[in-house]
Amino acid sequence: MAICQLAKVCSTKNDLLHIAEELFVKNGYTKTSIEDILKRAKISKGGFYHHFESKGDVLHALIDREIHLVTQEVEKIVRNNQLSALEKMEQYSLRAWALLKPKGKLFLEIFHQAKDPFINEEIFNELRSHILPLLVKIVEQGIREGTMTVKYPYETVDSLMMIREGLVRVMPEIHQNQQKMLRYFMADKEIVCRTLGIKGDFISKQLESILSAHLKLNKVK
Amino acid sequence: MAICQLAKVCSTKNDLLHIAEELFVKNGYTKTSIEDILKRAKISKGGFYHHFESKGDVLHALIDREIHLVTQEVEKIVRNNQLSALEKMEQYSLRAWALLKPKGKLFLEIFHQAKDPFINEEIFNELRSHILPLLVKIVEQGIREGTMTVKYPYETVDSLMMIREGLVRVMPEIHQNQQKMLRYFMADKEIVCRTLGIKGDFISKQLESILSAHLKLNKVK
DNA sequence: TGATTACAGACCGACCGTCGGTTTGTGAAT
DNA sequence: ATTCACAAACCGACGGTCGGTCTGTAATCA
């Protein structure tokens, strides 16, 4: 019975999170009122505020949940002793570009493009505090291995992340044109190579797969 | 009398703009209510909405005004036939970093650091649509002159602007530490050189002046 | 004098968040 | 088994803020 009660508790909170996620994605954060969530969840204001401190609290919970997932993914890459720094950076880059897909599965993927400055700011800060240190480790490894030459690893990686963040903002515009998308992708690849002092080819094998995924998704549209 | 009347009109509207600017900078856009502005301007709601369509309209007016100024400045640099592409880019870079000063004069300079995601989004889009094409012209000139090597000028410059935009967001953090500031500045310089394929030194003469300006301002703090 | 301009201020509706109160479940004492 | 004490989950009316609208009005101009 105690377990049942606990399950009920979690279920309600999860319901709220789930519904909020759906509405936030569908209508945007600012345009979604708490009452909208209540209506769908068939719960009262009091019930809502029993589980969450504020509307922003729900957003935080959603973002935290997914940032955690992404962080774990990146950590797995960084900790893999089998991989060279180049391979690690390649895997991360592919993952990051996958995040820019027009139709993702994660809340982040969709939400990051929701044009809601509040959310973008939140996600940007969270990614910066969690992912940035991990990427710096990769670059430091690259420097040790002699495949990268970077004077200011932390600041450079930070800057590269800012580009990705900026790309998210302009993605709606870019997605409308496959040629554009391709150019931005190639430019990004070039920028990463140059800023990190990587010589030779980088991201070649899986390039087509990720690109074709983008293009396919655009065709479906 | 007609002139007097017209002058009165402009004066009231300018008063509103001026007060709004002050309050926005001081308390942030979202935290400044229209009534705050009315109180200071000693005007009624009706008066306000006679001159502006909405709260956002005031913001637009303020941003537009200053974007126009910045655009003119950059245009002056781009159109100066005396300058090489490198010199133009150098001048722009210095100007851009001046924008990151903790205490600027322009509304943009202060406001850009106001932590209000809405504003940053606005300014980002405006800068992108007005400044980006101008910078692309510089890079194209650089390519013609053989001092720059860029495969995707538009996308690359776009990315560089995204970095500057991102820097604005984290400036409050960076400004607290002179060493940090210096590293970010140097990293930025390096990134610009590498991504644009610039060989040799870039931004050297005026480097100290702009840096010392930053550092002095920090000391005063 | 009629029309337009430049305001004044009451009012509206949407929204976030609070608060006192109720129900439901839980564990212990009787 | 029943009662009691207590806490967690939940209800919904309400307060207060804020952006925006609407009607009224005084001055000015044609």
Image: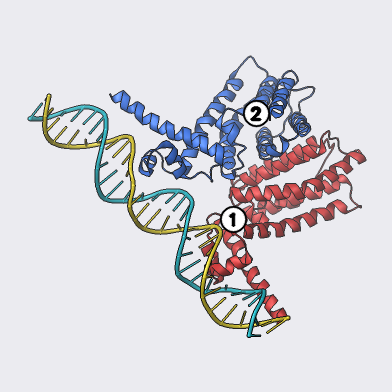
Chain colours: A blue, B red, C cyan, D yellow
User: In the visual, does A193 lie left or right of B14?
Assistant: right
User: In the visual, does B66 lie left or right of A18?
Assistant: right
How far across and down, in percent of the image, does residue A97 sit? 67, 28
| Label annotation for residue B221 | 1
How far across and down, in percent of the image, does residue A91 sit? 66, 22
Q: Residue at x 63, y 60 (%)?
A: B58
Give the amino acid at mark 1.
Answer: Lys
Question: Dot 2, crowdedness within 10 Å: few (<14), some or many (≥20)?
Answer: some
D3 and B221: which is toward the camera: D3
A84 and B221: which is toward the camera: A84
Q: Residue at x 67, y 55 (%)?
A: B108
Q: Residue at x 76, y 31 (%)?
A: A178
**As drawn, A16 above or below D20:** above
| Label annotation for residue A96 | 2
How far across and down, in percent of the image, does residue A148 sit? 73, 25
How far across and down, in percent of the image, does residue B138 sit? 85, 45
Chain of the residue under label 1: B
C14 and B125: which is toward the camera: C14
Locate residue D15: give its quadrant. Answer: bottom left
- How far apart are the alpha carbons under marks 2 and 1? 39 Å
**As drawn, B45 above or below B122:** below
